[in-house]
Image: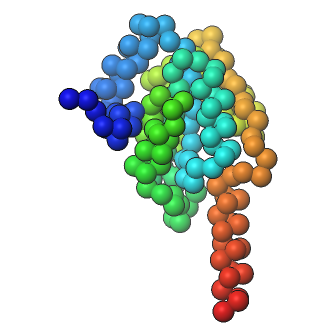
Amino acid sequence: MSKTDLEVLQAKIITDPVVLDRLIAVWKFKENKIVFTNGCFDLIHRGHVEYLAKASALGDVLVVGLNTDASVRSIKGRSRPLQDEYSRALILAAMRFVDYVVLFDEDTPENLIRKIQPDVLVKGGDYKPSEIVGYDIVTAKGGKVVTIELVENFSTTRLIKKIRKSSKKKLKLF
């Protein structure tokens, strides 16, 4: 029996550390170039899509580390995330260029980067490579840290502000 599309997407979301260990072993055995990036990805927008597509082009396997709900709240405050971790993970998994989504509960993905040992670590152009969490881990083994220019005027925070501003204007009309 073949898997449904939803089952295929769900299989791209890794929550079991043993499954992740097996995948890492397969990627290393096949000598795949592993690309890793991470984020909250709370409201997926054009900037995220372009960023992830460009990150994917840097290697053979794109692994996206996704902050859990608890992690997002710790970083961004009690009003976030707007979408739960499963919803965010499923949306990311639906992108054809995202190979796997791995949730992490800490504020940073340092432990996950240490475990995966990616060949390429990617973050947005708003970071300096040497300041990116995992820089030391990846460069120590000869890997690269790459920053990708952000799509101007696209961010989740900007979208939230725009929605709130629009909602206030509509309320004033009544």
Residue 105 in view, yes or no: no
Occupied quadrant, residue 135: top right
Q: Residue at x 58, y 11 (%)?
A: 141
Q: Position of residue 128 (x, y in %)?
A: 75, 33
Q: Position of residue 125 (x, y in %)?
A: 75, 36
Q: Position of residue 117 (x, y in %)?
A: 51, 19
Left or right relative to 104: residue 132: right
> In the image shown, does 38 or 153 lie closer to the viewer?
153
Residue at the outermost left position = 1
Q: Residue at x 62, y 32 (%)?
A: 53
Q: Quadrant of the C terminus?
A: bottom right
Residue at the outermost right position = 152
User: Relative to 30, does residue 92 appear above or below in the rendering?
Assistant: below
Q: Quadrant of the N terminus?
A: top left
Residue 58 in view, yes or no: yes
Q: Residue at x 71, y 59 (%)?
A: 158
Residue at the outermost bottom position = 174
Q: Position of residue 40 (x, y in %)?
A: 55, 47
